[in-house]
Amino acid sequence: MYKSALKENIMTTVEKNKTYTVTIDDLSYEGMGVAHIDGYPLFVENALPNEEVSIKAVKVGKKFGYGKVVERFNANPERQEVKDLDLLRSGIAPLSHMTYDYQLRFKQEQIENVLKSIAKLPELPVAETLGMEHPFEYRNKAQVPVQKVNDKLTTGFYRKNSHVLLPIENYLIQDPKIDQAILAVRDILQRFNVKAYNERENTGFIRHIVIRRGHYSHEMMVILVTRAERFFKGTEIAEVIHDELPEVVSVIQNINPEKTNVIMGREEKVLYGKATIDDTLLGKTYRISSKSFYQVNTQQTEVLYQTAIEFADLKSDDVVVDAYCGIGTIGLSLADKVEHVYGMEIVPQAIEDAKANAETNGIKNANYEIGKAEKIMSRWAREGIKPTVVFVDPPRKGLDEKFIEASAAVAPEKIIYISCNPATLARDLRRYEDLGYHAVKVQPVDLFPQTHHVESVTLLVKAV
């Protein structure tokens, strides 16, 4: 995997808009081909190692540039036909030009490389990535922008690094029922003459359509993100959405008046049905609200959590901390195997959902609190709560330094680290190593086929 951190300036003769013939010699962590001209790196979309290509230099910086394939003279044997180039251009499916086996190896190598370069743990074994039998149509959530194109409401996705909308109807990686629902909702809004948001002028009304669908329950939630609160005929529109899409049990208006790239605003109104949908995961039922974090690939989440539970090798007298607990999916999945589960999360709505989910599933040995993980962990330690196993599932930025110190200070026997970012995982494993926790094994799990994202589970044990 290509190391993109280039500290020295490279003098280059590469010129923008000129065409060059190059051989791709590497892949970036995002899956872009890398070629070099006199040592100057160019990142090339839809290009694989050992392919000779003619490229046009579309952007030239001091340290690196970007090229676009004009002609391909040979193909890597691991190349597969791209179903829709817009899926590459938008970043929806940036690895869709690779065979799936090659994607899985690529993701395993991502983790191996950062463990060597960042964690300084070259001997730590990384298992082969656990993939899907059908690595398409897996996403249970979609959030798509709405724009006016040729006097019509249009949905799709932005071209990478721009706000140019690419009209897309088949997203390849989303539940097909969600793709169909996006079009149906868009057309209903069109019929009611709802105006699309104009981000340059901060005018118009409908900004995004967000849809969640339970993998097992098939319950569907439609969230209409609007610029203003007043929604003319909003209730009527919501009822029509339900009439035309009977799976829809919840229609919510989310109000976001800010001129921002953040999709969801703070204020919400239920326009139809209930405020949540339900789904199941590893046999437990979960309430999912509009802003709740819930893994987007239900099938592979079950593989991921089952792997984490197996790594923990839980006993009936274990006390478990589920940090960054979200709506409680990890802790509640294992609560019947242990003495007690404690969870924390900074999102109040998620903690409400976690408490409701514990009650729904008849789980009485789980407690959840709102707050930063590092602060609550330290307070629990002062109160005499001594976890034997700590599960962490942080966002892409990884763990806070204070949390790492606090979790090591309470001296659990094991830490199970579920990661969605190999680089921050490697950084945090190095920190834990220095505090006496040794990483034993890593299992990558592919929750995001056709993309460069990779989840993994790592077992850390306290040094004796």
Image (spheres, rainbow, N blue to C red):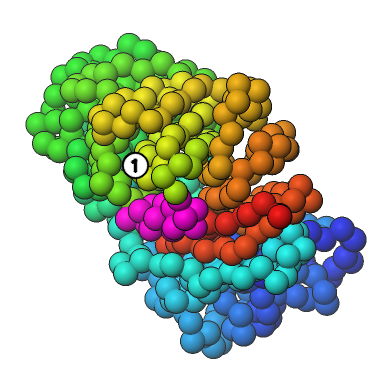
User: Which residue range is magenta in the image?
Assistant: 299-314
Q: Nearer the viewer, residue 120 or 335?
A: 335
Q: Nearer the viewer, residue 353 or 387?
A: 387
**Label 1 sits on what residue type?**
Asp
Q: Position of residue 272 (x, y in %)?
A: 19, 21
Taking 76 as reference, is 414 above or below it? above
Q: Position of residue 374 (x, y in %)?
A: 65, 30
Taking 65 as reference, is 226 above or below it? above
Q: Position of residue 168 (x, y in %)?
A: 35, 52
| Residue 308 part of the magenta segment | yes
| Residue 118 part of the magenta segment | no
Give the residue at x 32% y 55%: 299
Q: Nearer the viewer, residue 11 or 110?
A: 110
Give the residue at x 50% y 39%: 320
Where, by quadrant of the figure, is residue 57 drawn?
A: bottom right
Where, by quadrant of the figure, is residue 290 drawn?
A: top left
Give the residue at x 26% y 34%: 361
Q: Residues within 10 Å of mark 1 (few under 14, many from 20)?
A: some
Instruction: Please give left or right for residue 200 compared with residue 436 in the image.
Output: left
The residue indicated by pointer 1 is: 336
Give the residue at x 25% y 46%: 283
Q: Position of residue 375 (x, y in %)?
A: 64, 25
Magenta stretch: dominant SS? helix
Q: Nearer the viewer, residue 221 or 70?
A: 221
Instruction: Please give left or right for residue 15 compared with residue 290 in the image.
Output: right
Taking 402 as reference, is 174 above or below it? below
